[in-house]
């Protein structure tokens, strides 16, 4: 290789940016995705005996509704700030004045799950969490870890966000504006694509304005997307058997143009 040949830019770690995102995650989520997937995962998880593990549980958007439904939910996330917000949620009332058990929330790396072999009945990877694994080896390690902690025949549920690789590139677009904790918040976003690596990076600028003063928060979020066929091949290689594919949260048939890409796979 010539000394003049430019090296490709280093790939940014997919877990970076989430601590900074934590104060705004739920605010933005309510304006985009909301809670459309909760009922789908709740129906599946309530059929499982024993613990259910959620990868990338974040602020508890899914963890708490499943725990409220009686699921023995364990959530893991690398972001301290996301978990801190999940832990501050009040425990729901199960019946009468009794408080229901909340989820068990653990800080850790989904590539090296800190749980015993064959200790959980189901693993959830909801809302594109596996797309934050920006290298092939990261995904391979995570699937291997998932297989290790699942019981034989245990279920792995994966939800991919198909729109990410098709996102148009743009600069400094105002996406949302509204009130948050007594402040006026505006999200200004830029998107860039690295199609050779199948990476999409969202450059986020959150502007908080209160009493004439403005604070700016900047961070990037990077995601990697595989086709449904490629994800299926990775699952089989890791020792899973693909059982079903859905294109929405009502069990609709999957197609390449579906709104959601949901995969259910069994541990072999």
Image (spheres, rainbow, N blue to C red):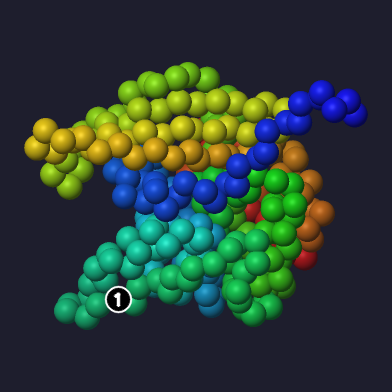
> In what element is the residue under mark 1?
loop
| Vertical placement of residue 99 versus 232, above or below | below
- What is the x, y in percent for residue 119? 62, 78
For the image shown, how many numbered marks are present on the structure?
1
| Vertical placement of residue 163 versus 215, above or below | above
In the displayed structure image, the side of residue 74 where residue 35 appears, left or right: left
Residue for point 60% across, 26% down = 193
User: In the orientation shown, which residue stands out farthest toward the right?
Assistant: 1
Question: Is residue 163 visible to the viewer in this orientation of the structure?
Answer: yes
In the displayed structure image, the side of residue 166 where residue 229 appears, left or right: right
In depth, the one of 143 and 182 nearer the eye is 182
In depth, the one of 206 and 195 nearer the eye is 206
Q: Quadrant of the C terminus?
A: bottom right
Residue for point 48% across, 71% down = 106
In the displayed structure image, the side of residue 14 where residue 228 appears, left or right: right
- What is the x, y in percent for residue 246? 59, 42
User: In the orientation shown, which residue stands out farthest toward the front?
Assistant: 3
Residue for point 30% across, 37% down = 216
- What is the x, y in percent for residue 36? 39, 44
Few, some or many C-alpha atoms within 10 Å of disc 1 (few <14, some 14-19, many ≥20)?
some
Residue for point 21% across, 35% down = 214
| Vertical placement of residue 137 versus 186, above or below | below
- What is the x, y in percent for residue 254? 61, 36
Residue at mark 1 = 100
Q: Quadrant of the N terminus?
A: top right
Residue 109: image quadrant is: bottom right
In the displayed structure image, the side of residue 245 where residue 213 appears, left or right: left
């Amino acid at each position: 290789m010539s000394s003049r040949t430019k090296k490709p830019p280093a790939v940014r770690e997919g877990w970076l940016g989430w601590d900074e995102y934590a104060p705004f995650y739920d605010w933005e989520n309510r304006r985009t995705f909301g809670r459309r997937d909760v009922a789908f995962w709740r129906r599946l998880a309530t059929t499982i005996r024993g613990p259910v593990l959620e990868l990338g549980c974040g602020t508890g958007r899914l963890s708490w509704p499943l725990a409220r439904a009686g699921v023995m939910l364990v959530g893991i996330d690398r972001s301290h700030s996301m978990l801190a917000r999940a832990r501050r949620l009040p425990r729901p009332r199960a019946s009468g004045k009794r408080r229901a058990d909340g989820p068990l929330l653990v800080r850790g790396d989904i590539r090296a799950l800190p749980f015993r072999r064959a200790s959980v009945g189901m693993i959830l990877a909801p809302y594109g969490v596996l797309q934050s694994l920006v290298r092939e080896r990261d995904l391979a390690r995570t699937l291997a870890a998932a297989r290790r902690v699942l019981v034989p025949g245990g279920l792995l549920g994966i939800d991919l966000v198909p729109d990410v690789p098709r996102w148009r590139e743009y600069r400094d677009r105002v996406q949302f504006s509204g009130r948050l904790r007594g402040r006026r918040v505006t999200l200004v976003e830029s998107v860039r694509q690295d199609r050779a690596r199948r990476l999409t990076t969202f450059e986020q600028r959150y502007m908080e304005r209160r009493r004439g003063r403005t604070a700016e928060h900047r961070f990037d979020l990077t995601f990697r997307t595989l086709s449904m066929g490629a994800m299926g091949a990775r699952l089989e290689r890791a020792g899973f058997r693909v059982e079903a594919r859905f294109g929405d949260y009502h069990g609709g048939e999957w197609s390449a143009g579906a709104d959601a890409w949901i995969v259910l796979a069994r541990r072999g």
